[in-house]
Amino acid sequence: MAGSAQGGATAQPQIPQGTNLANPMQQASLAQQGALVGTARGLAFDPGTLAQTNIGQYQNPYTEQVVRATEADILRGAQMGLNELGAQATRAGAFGGSRQGVAQAELGRNVLQQLAQSSAGLRQSGFQTAQQMAQQDIQNRMQAQQGRLGAAAQLGALGQQSFGYGTTIQQNLAQQGAQQQAIQQAIIDAAKAQYAGYTGAPTSSIGYVSQALGASAIPQSQTQTRQPGLFDYLTLAATAASG
Amino acid sequence: MSGGKGGSQTTSAEIPEWAKEPTIRNIARAEQAQQIGYQPYYGVDVAGFNPTQQAAMQQNIDAARAFGMVPTGYENLTAMSGMPQTVQQNGLIGYSSAPLYEQAVAASRAADPTQAAIYESLFSQDTGYTPKVG
C-alpha cells in the first residue's frame, strides 16, 4: 500500500532498561543506532502515488446527499414549470393541446440536461477536491519523511558529539590518574632506595675503612736483603787470583 | 725474589702499626657482613591503578559495551579483570613482587634441596654478634 513505511519510520530503537542517559557513550550509542535505523527506514520509505491511492477515502461522504438535494430542487422547479405551463394552457383554452405538449417536452429536456449537468458538476468537483487532498497527503508524507531524515542526521551528529565528550572525559581521567600513579610510584621507588640503603649499610661501612686507608699516605719501610750465589763467589775468586 | 746460581734478593714492605688494627677489624667486619645474606624487599614494588584510573578504564569498557563491542564470554569484564591482587601499605595501593619471589625460592629449594642447602650454609653462621641486653 502506498505510504506503508510512514508508520514504521517514526519507531525508534527501544532504550534498554538501566541505561544511564547521562553517560555520553550511552547517548552516542543510542543516537547512532537511532540515526542508522531512521536513515535506513528513510531509504525504504514510499510516499505513494495518486494512482495507488484510494481516492474514495477523500471523497465527501455527503456528496450523494448534496446531489440528491440539488436534483430535488431542480425537479421541484420543473414541477412548478409544468404547473405554470398547464395554467397558461388552461387560460388559453388549449390545455392538453399540442403546443402544451411541445412546451412540456422542451421543459423536460431542459430539466434532464440541468439534472445531468448539475450532478456531473458536483461529482467532478468532489473528485477534484478528493484528488487534491490525496496529493496533499502525499506531499505531507514526503515532507514528514524529509523531516525525519533530517532528524536522523542530527541525531547522528549529536551522537558523534557525545562520543567526543565521552572520549575527552575518559582521556582526562586517565591522564589525571596517571599523574597520581606517577607520584605513588615515586614514593615506592624512594622507599625501595631507602631500603636498599639499609640493607647495603654493612657493605658500605666496610668500604669507609678501606677508602680511608687507601686515601692515607702510608709510609712503607722497605728492607732489601741479598744472598750471594755460587756465581758471585766464583767471580770474587777470579778477581782475587788475577790481582 | 730471584735466586739460583746468581744468589737471591728479597724486598719486603712493612704496614705501619697504626694501620694494622683498623685493617684487621675491617676484614673481620666484612666476614660478619657476608653472613647476612640476601635481604629481600617486601614492600610495594609497583604502584597500582588508582580509583581515577580505574574509573577511566571502566568508562572505556562501558563505552565498548554501549556499542556492543564486548565479545561474548566477557560480559562481566571490569577495569581490574585479570589483574593480580593488590596490597596496601600506608594508603599506597600497589603490587609487590615478594610473593612471587618467595614462591620462586621455595620452588628452587624443592627442585634442588642440595644446592639450596649449600647456598644457605654460606650465610647465617656465627657472626660474633652479641646482642646488647638492657
Image (cartoon, coloured by chain):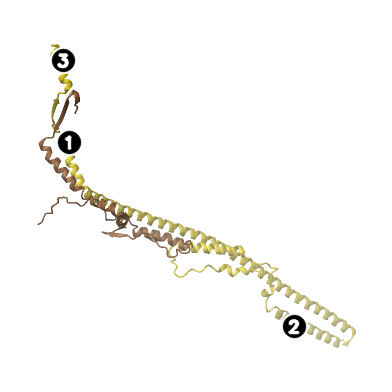
Chain colours: A yellow, B brown
- Residue type highlighted by circle 1: Ala
Q: Nearer the viewer, residue B132 or A83?
A: B132
| Residue B62 shows in this picture | yes
Q: Name the secondary structure under disc 2.
A: helix
| Residue A188 shows in this picture | no
Residue A147 in which image quadrant: bottom right
Rendered position, B12 above or below A33: above
Please state, as top left, top right, bottom left or bottom right, where the C terminus of chain B lies in the image: bottom left
Residue A117, percent from left and from top: 77, 75
Q: Is residue A124 left or right of residue A168?
A: right
Residue A132, percent from left and from top: 67, 69
Other-residue count near label 1 (Cα within 10 Å), few / some / many at <14 / 14–19 / ≥20: few
Residue A121, percent from left and from top: 74, 74
Residue shown at 76% from the left, 84% from the top: A76
Other-residue count near label 2 (Cα within 10 Å), few / some / many at <14 / 14–19 / ≥20: few
**Residue position marked by numbered label 1 in the rendering:** A215
Q: Which chain does the numbered disc 3 sit on?
A: A
Q: Which chain does the numbered disc 1 sit on?
A: A
Q: Which chain does the numbered disc 2 sit on?
A: A
- Residue type highlighted by circle 2: Ala
Q: Nearer the viewer, residue B34 or B63?
A: B34
- Residue type highlighted by circle 3: Ala
Q: Name the secondary structure under disc 1.
A: helix
Q: Name the secondary structure under disc 3.
A: helix
**Residue position marked by numbered label 2 in the rendering:** A72
Rendered position, B131 above or below A60: above
Sooner in the amino-acid sequence: mark 2 or mark 3: 2
Q: Is residue A105 left or right of residue A41?
A: right
Q: Residue furthest right?
A: A98
**Residue position marked by numbered label 3 in the rendering:** A238
Cα distance between the residues tagged 1 and 3:
52 Å
Sooner in the amino-acid sequence: mark 1 or mark 3: 1
